[in-house]
Image (spheres, coloured by chain):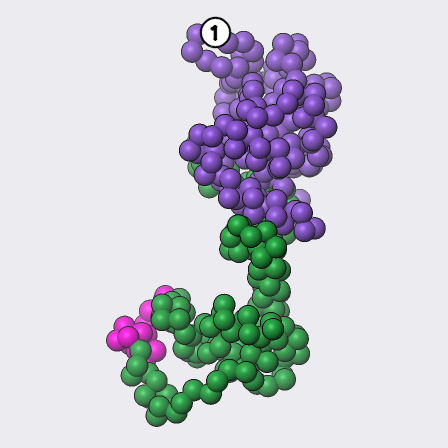
Chain colours: A green, B purple
Amino acid sequence: MFAADLARFRPKYTGLLATIPGGQDSALASLGWASVLASRPARPDRGGAAAALSRLAPWAQSTRRGTPDRNRSRRSVKSGRACGQCYATPEMTLDSLSPSERGWLVDDELRWQRARRIAERHGHVDVSGVYHVLRNLEKSPSERLKAALTHGRLFRFNGR
Amino acid sequence: MDDFSVLTAGEKRLLEALRTSGVRFMIVGLSAAVLQGANAATRDIDVWFEDLEDPRIARAIREAGGIWISGFFGARPPQIGGDAIGDRLDVVTHMHGLGAFSDEFANTREVRIDGIPLRVLDIRRVLASKRATGRPKDLAAVPALEEAIAVIEET
């Protein structure tokens, strides 16, 4: 059930997850990601990495070839989102993440799952909005208020 | 974070003075909602006093270095003025869609802002007020409040 949901709502993850060594990360496996991989239909072999690269948009190809670009990672991610798939670029693979980064990813996935469950129970609310509320609740009330006032007005206009 | 502060020194002095002098007030509006987790932006901290003619309000404001304009005269509403406090604390005179202050006070919860315990109107009542007010800017905040309430009801 969960694997199907994840595959349906998060198609962009499937490419990313293709790089997870099976069973290496028990935390991720416990989230059902391994089963997503197992249930993912195998992609037809279209000629390997070179051919896959040629299917990307020209600007994405140039990013992959190593064009100096400080937005490199962001562009790669965006290219995957734009077409509903995720091309696992070297800088995006889970293997390249540190343990703390992987830990963050696990926690964040749990947060998203919780947000989705809450949104489903409340019908009309937005999943992303619920997610951000969950993030907000991890801050102190003072931190929340400071962020809200910072966005609502510029602190420096108030002597700060 | 020990050195984290959202309030200015003047705002802190004022809120402490109001609290210790026993003035009944509560934080309302989007600030109240944000303190309870809503993901929203706001320009000010709305303060609802039980009695605007309470002389302790004026004393507390003077103590904090500000100026208290209590009544409606000229073009201005009640206001906490003066540079020492700034302009982020707004005085609310009426909350659309809500009951009397004394009734709504039962719908507050204590939240510490920079270590100062303050009464904050429950986010569900903030939502009721926003809906009743019905201005575009109030209605625009409704989804954010609903999202926060959905989470709060699950915890």
Q: Nearer the viewer, residue A66 or B89?
A: B89
Q: Nearer the viewer, residue A43 or B71?
A: A43
Q: Position of residue B146 (x, y in %)?
A: 56, 44
The quarter holding residue B29 reads top right
Which residues are the magenta region? Answer: A57-72
Asked if residue A60 shows in the view, the reply is yes
Q: Residue furthest toward the left?
A: A58
Rendered position, A64 above or below A160: below
Q: Chain of mark 1?
A: B
Q: Is residue A127 left or right of residue B153?
A: left
Asked if residue A67 shows in the view, the reply is no
Rendered position, A38 above or below A79: below
Q: Residue at x 49, y 36 (%)?
A: B42
Q: Is residue A130 left or right of residue B119?
A: left
Q: Residue at x 39, y 92 (%)?
A: A45
Q: How many marks?
A: 1
- Give the class, few, some or many, for how many residues have Cα within 10 Å of label 1's Cα (few <14, many ≥20): few
Going by the numbered disc 1, the residue's amino acid type is Phe
Rendered position, B101 above or below B110: above
Q: Residue furthest toward the top?
A: B73
Q: Position of residue B112 (x, y in %)?
A: 69, 37
Q: Secondary structure at mark 1?
A: loop
> Which residue does the numbered mark 1 point to in the structure image?
B73
